[in-house]
Image (cartoon, rainbow, N blue to C red):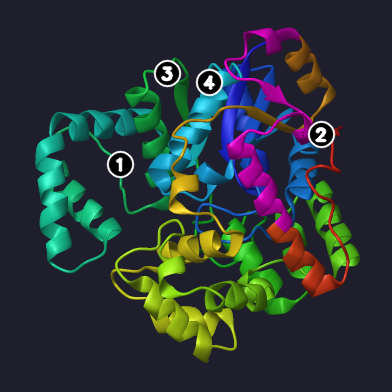
Amino acid sequence: MKAVGVVVEYNPFHNGHFYHISQSKSNSNADVVIAVMSGHFLQRGEPALLDKWHRTKMALNNGVDIVIELPYVFCTGYATAFAEGAIQLLEAIGCTHFAFGSEEGSIQPFLNTFHILKKHEEQYNALIKHYVTTGISYPQSLYKAYEELRQMDVNSTIDLSQPNNILGYHYIEAAKRLNLQIEPMTIPRIKAGFHDDIDNNSTIASATGIRKAIFEQQTLQEIKQFLPPASFTLLKNWQSEYGSFIHWETLWPYLRFAILRNTPEQLSRFADVSEGIEFALIKAAKKSDSFNQFMNQIKSKRYTWTRLQRIVTHIYTGITKDQLHESTKPSYIRLLGMSQNGQAYLSKHKKQFQLPLISRVASTKDPMLLLDIRATDMYALGVEYSSGKQMASDYQTPPIRL
């Protein structure tokens, strides 16, 4: 059985994701779609809208055959670490191809971009250092350095100001640099841009636009047309069970406590805390009644909103620098759910997997997995605070079977 892999968050699963899954399977002639999915905290430093079990069910009800979890150390990392962890897991579980959505829509410009940056690596790094010294953010420095190199080559390259192009490039970079056998494919992103608000004249919207509409309108009817029926039902089920969806404002009382209970020296030990930002975090937390107020006091050119969200994610979950960087590659494949087709694939191929397959967390004490369990527990604490109801733990939840 041939498998194609996708890297996802499904926050939540929408019609654009459905299109991506169907095109990935069709274009790769695959029998099985395997999704490596972020857990309860995401790449941009945000808590997921709803738990990973509901998001796994969304995936399985809409064409995904196997869902595995991207460990916390990768799913909350910068794009390079995020991509490396995800692509290594898809290779380990036997995928021949991985398919990502992009604004570019064609794979050759991605490959050209990789070769250009590889060929001019020293010059590229020198340009990045130069732009950083001008006071602009590191992501902006990367972009400016790339644009300067891009003008020197006649081959078509990608626009690295576009978020899905950026992640797609890092997937390919990871596969090439690690000498993996898995082959890249890209599916054109259709209609809605990454940051676009919902458009009521369409059935396609970005996850960002959908989440914004949910929190602003406080109703699911506004976003129904953008979701497959199963996704809409699961969102309704979550809302009925827990009352509201999860975001940083939900978790703010606990995050504020986590910041203020520590000294500056203690805060400096958490992952990504650097350059004295710990003092600004404490000062802002003392004055802020909301997460938004807190963030607006500390964001700057050097500390972007996303970078700060990653920092406070690690403080909230209690993950230190040493814990985050203890491992540079996945050590297991954590199974979250499977369809009948997915179960057949696992039965046929699991002896060839490059990493152990874990279906029940009680059977292992892997340090990387223990961080995932802690992240789930801290997410569940916020759910309980906002709803008064407990959420199932990793120990209580077996893989979902569709």
The number of callouts visible is: 4
Q: Which residues are magenta?
A: 348-377
Membership of 346 in magenta stretch: no
Circle nearer the viewer, 4 or 1: 4
Q: How much space separates mark 2 and mark 4, taking CA atoms?
A: 21 Å
Asked if marks 4 and 1 touch (Cβ < 8 Å), the reply is no
Q: Give amino acid for label 4.
A: Glu
Q: How much space separates mark 4 and mark 1, taking CA atoms?
A: 25 Å
**Residue 289 locus on image (x, y percent):** 59, 89
Q: Give amino acid for label 2.
A: Pro
Question: Which residue is labeled 3 in the image?
Answer: 180
Question: Which residue is labeled 2 in the image?
Answer: 399
**Residue 345 locus on image (x, y percent):** 74, 15
Circle nearer the viewer, 1 or 3: 3
Question: Which residue is labeled 4 in the image?
Answer: 91
Residue 270 horizontal side relative to residue 127, left or right: right
Q: Give amino acid for label 3.
A: Leu
Q: How much space separates mark 2 and mark 1, taking CA atoms?
A: 38 Å
Task: Choose the circle earlier in sequence order: 3 or 2.
Answer: 3
Task: Choose the circle earlier in sequence order: 4 or 1.
Answer: 4
Residue 30 horizontal side relative to residue 274, left or right: right
Magenta stretch: helix, strand or loop mostly:
helix
Task: Choose the circle earlier in sequence order: 3 or 4.
Answer: 4
Residue located at (63% from left, 25% from top): 25
**Residue 347 locus on image (x, y percent):** 78, 12
Residue at the extreme bottom of the image, as rendered: 287
Q: Nearer the viewer, residue 246 or 315?
A: 315
Q: Residues within 10 Å of mark 4 (few under 14, many from 20)?
A: many
